[in-house]
Amino acid sequence: MSFDPQQFKSQFPLFAQSENSDLVYLDNAATTQRPQTVIDAISHFYLHDNANTHRSSHRLARQATTMVERCREKAAAFLGAKLSQEIIFCRGATEALNLLAFSLGESLQAGDEIILSTAEHHANLVPWQRVAQRTGAVLRFIEDSQGVLDIHQLNTLINDKTRIVSISAASNALGVKTDLYSVKQLLAGRNINWIVDAAQLAAHQVIDAQALGCDFLVCSAHKFFGPTGIGLLYGREDALSLLPPWQSGGEMITHVALTQSEYAQAPHRFETGTSSLAAIAGLEAVLDWWGQQDRQAIQDYEQQLTHYLHKSLSALPNIKVLSPLAQNVGVVAFVPSDKTSIADMAHWLDEQDIAVRAGHHCAMPLMERVTEGGSLRASVMAYNTREDIDRLIAAIKSQPAQISSAALSDAEDIILTDVSNYDIDALHQQRGWQKRYKLLLGWGEAVVTQPLMRRSQYLVKGCEAEAWLYHSQQGDQHFFAVDSDARVVKGLASLLLVYLQGRTSTEIESLDLAAEFQALGLDKHLSPSRNNGFRALMQAALEYAQVSQA
């Protein structure tokens, strides 16, 4: 029987809400949606079973404890663990990796070596950097080409000082899977702790930790249709028994005296304090739900959809696709090849109710080698359809063309931004945010690009896209120049300068800028990150003018 994506999608109530009737959700590598059964399980816990686990003798506590340990058994089956005691509940893959870095780092000495890859998510890079700084251990790296790891470099990287190998099963930024079974062969018989970050893999294929042979494996429930705030750390029983605890207090002890304590065995040694019990209830529900799905059919469908997405984007003349297609878990990263910035394109797609992600995707070293300034990332799940991808392609095609910036004058001085022709009344008179947004884009198109401004002293921190602000004072009057790679940021900055350009500090202080911008609907219609960036620009300009506004 063929896979039916519409029937699959009907299990996810977010898509049935009126405000999401036209939503194309292609941000699944960041977080997936939740089936109704997960939402029901969380609600059921709070309605019927809410109590803390273990030690308490009353009925609700027993019910909650039974649920947690039952979920642990199901999680062990989901990851292919031998024993339920090999499963530790964490807040997510990031916390699990921090736990491992801290606990394994306790036994490291100066000169010991940790092998990572150059394609790692920050969560599998920064904790090890801190361990190396703390212990004097050395980080070594398997190199990648467009996200594809040259696994056989392990032959030359491993030596008698190698203590840890920690690599991702799949890149969250480019979607490329790692050949884990080749890693297994290269590490066979060596006394090295092998960690697998499976955050991007768990939703896309069955995981068998025993067959894989890794010592530890981590993943996050929100990546495979489960709740946020809960994740899994698998550790082989003998490997976990050697780890010291990460955090202290609560239920991770067997006996506490005033000057020393005795710690529980795994997994409870690593589960300090009150767990996210409702999230664990939701996790149990999604594990049950996965048991009812045809995983091979889902995997085959997602691969077909990934091929269609890759092919459709590659056919666009103004798009450069960055993600390799082979061994891809449904992630396609791309950048505009014309003058359009990724921030502008992401914002345009959001205006068309298409959700993608823009930036470095928490894999900055990888993305800075692949492309300057990050990328857009579209990521699919089985509730996506070809129609979703067609909507994405049509939206990219319909984005207003970037107008070339005016040429710089031969003078080496920074050019002040000319806002004399911008009609604020015309902006207010536009009916609907879409028309105001297009007018602001037009204002942004006229802003001159100025390489001389693109220096650290003019950079405004806190903006979604990089933005620069230059200030000059002539007598009592304040003048500004702005620049950014994003047209909408240029447009918003121009709006700000309509009120500030050429005014004195006294005149600026008398303005009620918050009320002006609220009347235009900026707070309501700008995304939180765009709104924060606009406020950062405004704050920087007011500080230049030595004006404070609440």
Image (cartoon, rainbow, N blue to C red):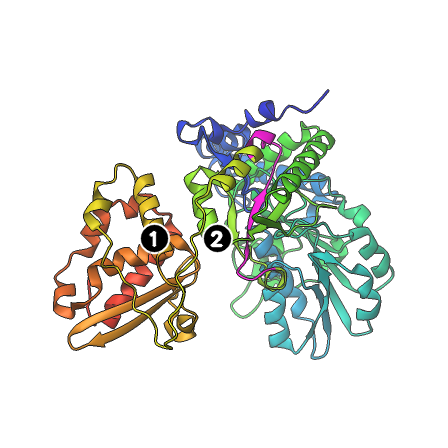
> Is 186 drawn above or below residue 424 in the view shown?
below
Q: Identify which amino acid the numbered label 1 is placed on.
A: Asn
Residue in front for this viewpoint, 404 or 230: 404
Q: Position of residue 363 (x, y in %)?
A: 59, 59
Would you say 408 lies left or right of 30 here?
A: left
Q: Residue at the spot x=77%, y=70% of the render?
A: 162
Query: In this rendering, is residue 263 above or below 423?
Result: below
Is disc 1 in contact with disc 2, using a CB cutoff of under 8 Å? no
Report the residue at 45% width, 35% height from top.
Answer: 46
Between 549 and 519, which is closer to the camera in this rendering?
A: 519
Between residue 45 and residue 288, name the one nearer to us.
288
Q: Around disc 2, counting alpha carbons within 10 Å, would you say few (fewer than 14), some (14 to 19), or many (20 or more)?
A: some
Amino acid beneath label 2:
Thr
Q: Is residue 378 magenta?
A: yes
Q: Residue furthest top?
A: 1
- Residue 102 visible (yes or no): no
Residue 172 appears in the picture as rendered: yes
Q: Report the residue marked by disc 1.
A: 531
Which label's residue is closer to the chain start, 1 or 2?
Answer: 2
Q: Position of residue 343 (x, y in %)?
A: 46, 53
The quarter of the rendered structure image containing the N terminus is top right
Against 2, is 63 above or below?
below
Q: How many marks?
A: 2
Residue segment shown in magenta: 371-388
- The residue wearing badge 2 is 340
Find residue 243 and report its horizontal and vertical position in percent.
Answer: 68, 62
Q: Nearer the viewer, residue 501 or 99?
A: 501
**1 vs 2, front mark:** 2
Helix, strand or loop status at disc 1: helix
Q: Is residue 343 left or right of residue 90?
A: left
Residue visible at 65% across and 32% down in the picture: 290
